[in-house]
Every structure is written in structure tokens, then in C-alpha cells.
């Protein structure tokens, strides 16, 4: 798993290899079983953030009528930033649950800040990583809004085809903003 981190860090940093290895040695890596909640809707958000090394984490919320609405799936080499989902002091509007057995980097705000002071370039790397993530998220959201359900499904096939095998159809349909029946019809058309 540490090799995955080294490869990922190499994309965004100018840190020397020995500095990267030192950082990776300080990072906490935990395993989570399928079905584990990282946070439940209504809980107060932690100051933790996660980075997926292996597995799939689903972000969703439950509406007043009991309907679950999937808003994201996080898979390998994606960051999950809980503190950025909510306003400070407010209960979480989302739940995060492991759809598969997962291996995640777990970091908290305080340890992250200490590492930034020790490794100045790490903060720049994190900023570059977050800028890339924000650009991608904004582009995906804009494309999602202007796309038809069929176009959304085609986009999933092109950009995140692994989700088709990894997540239940009703959750994928919810993520696409359609019913499972509509998803079945679209799949038959394609």
C-alpha cells in the first residue's frame, strides 16, 4: 500500500524520495470492513480526512421520506475530506460507508498541520492535489447537470467503469439521479 502512496505523491510533489518515505512512515493506514460507517448522517463531523488506497466508500444522505440518495463514490487514489463537507459545529448531512473492505489513510487536522511544518513542500503538494480534485469535481458537476440520464450513464462507462461492477444497481441509479428501472432501460439501449 505504501507504494501506491509513493506513486501518488510523485505526481504532486517535489519532495525527495527519502522525505516521501519519512512522511509515509508517519501516516496512519487502517483497514475497514465492508459495511463500516466512517460517519453517519446526524453525527458531528470529525476532523479526520481519508485517502482511499483500496476499496470503495459511498457518500449518501437519507431524505425525510426515507429515500437514500447517493451523492458520491470514492475509490482508489481519492481523498475524502469530512471537515470540508459540513459547516463547523453542524451535524453531518451525509453518511459515509464502506461498500467493500477498505484500506484507508486516516489523517487528522492537527497531525496534518504538524507534518506541514516539518515538510514545507507537503502543504504545497496537498494544495496542488486539492486544486486538481476541485477542478475535476467542478467539471464533473457541470457536465452532470447539463447531461441526460443516458449521457450520465455513458460518462460513467467512460470515466468510472469499475463502479458498474462494484456498486449495487440501485445505488448507481441514485447517483445518476434516476430510478433503477430507468437505469435498466438505459443499459438495454446501450
Image: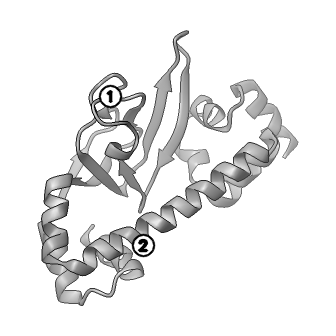
Label 1 environment density (alpha carbons within 10 Å; few <14, some 14–19, many ≥20): few
Q: How is the image coloured?
A: one colour
Q: Is residue 161 visible?
A: no
In this rendering, position of residue 163 left or right of residue 186: left
Q: Is residue 162 above or below residue 149?
A: below
Residue at far top of view: 65
The earlier-in-sequence mark between 2 and 1 is: 1
**In the structure shown, which secondary structural element does the residue marked by tag 2 occupy?**
helix
Residue at x 34%, y 75% (from the top left corner): 125
Quarter that holds the N terminus: bottom left
- Crowding around mark 2 (Cα neighbors within 10 Å: few <14, some 14 to 19, many 20+) is some
Residue 144 appears in the picture as rendered: yes
The residue sitting at the bottom extreme is 16
Q: List the residue tagged with mark 1.
A: 90
Q: Quadrant of residue 186?
A: top right
Q: Secondary structure at mark 1?
A: loop
Marks 2 and 1, how far apart at CA: 28 Å
Looking at the picture, how far across and down is residue 28, in whole percent? 16, 58
Q: Which numbered circle lies on residue 4? A: none
- Residue 190 in the image: x percent, y percent? 84, 47
Q: Position of residue 99 (x, y in %)?
A: 42, 38
The label shown at residue 128 is 2
Does the residue at mark 2 contact the one at mark 1 (Cβ under 8 Å)?
no
Q: Nearer the viewer, mark 2 or mark 1?
A: 1
Q: Is residue 57 left or right of residue 186?
A: left
Q: Identify the residue at image location x=39%, y=42%.
A: 100
Residue 19, quarter of the rendered image: bottom left
Q: Residue furthest front?
A: 88
Q: Quadrant of residue 41?
A: top left
Amino acid at each position: 500500500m505504501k507504494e501506491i502512496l509513493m506513486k501518488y505523491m510523485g505526481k504532486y510533489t517535489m519532495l525527495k524520495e527519502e522525505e516521501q518515505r519519512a512522511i509515509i512512515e508517519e501516516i496512519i493506514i487502517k483497514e475497514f470492513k465492508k459495511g463500516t460507517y466512517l460517519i453517519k448522517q446526524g453525527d458531528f463531523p470529525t476532523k479526520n480526512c481519508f485517502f482511499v488506497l483500496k476499496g470503495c466508500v459511498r457518500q449518501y444522505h437519507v431524505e425525510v421520506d426515507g429515500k437514500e440518495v447517493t451523492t458520491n463514490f470514492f475509490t482508489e487514489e481519492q481523498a475524502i475530506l469530512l471537515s470540508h463537507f459540513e459547516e463547523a459545529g453542524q451535524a453531518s448531512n451525509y453518511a459515509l460507508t464502506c461498500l467493500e473492505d477498505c484500506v484507508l489513510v486516516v489523517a487528522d487536522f492537527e497531525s496534518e498541520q504538524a507534518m506541514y511544518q516539518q515538510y514545507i513542500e507537503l502543504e504545497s503538494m496537498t494544495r496542488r492535489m486539492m486544486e486538481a480534485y476541485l477542478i475535476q469535481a467542478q467539471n464533473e458537476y457541470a457536465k452532470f447537470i447539463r447531461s441526460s440520464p443516458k449521457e450520465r450513464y455513458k460518462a460513467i462507462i467512460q470515466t468510472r467503469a469499475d463502479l458498474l461492477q462494484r456498486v449495487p444497481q440501485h445505488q448507481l441509479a441514485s447517483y445518476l439521479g434516476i430510478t433503477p428501472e430507468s437505469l435498466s432501460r438505459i443499459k438495454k439501449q446501450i
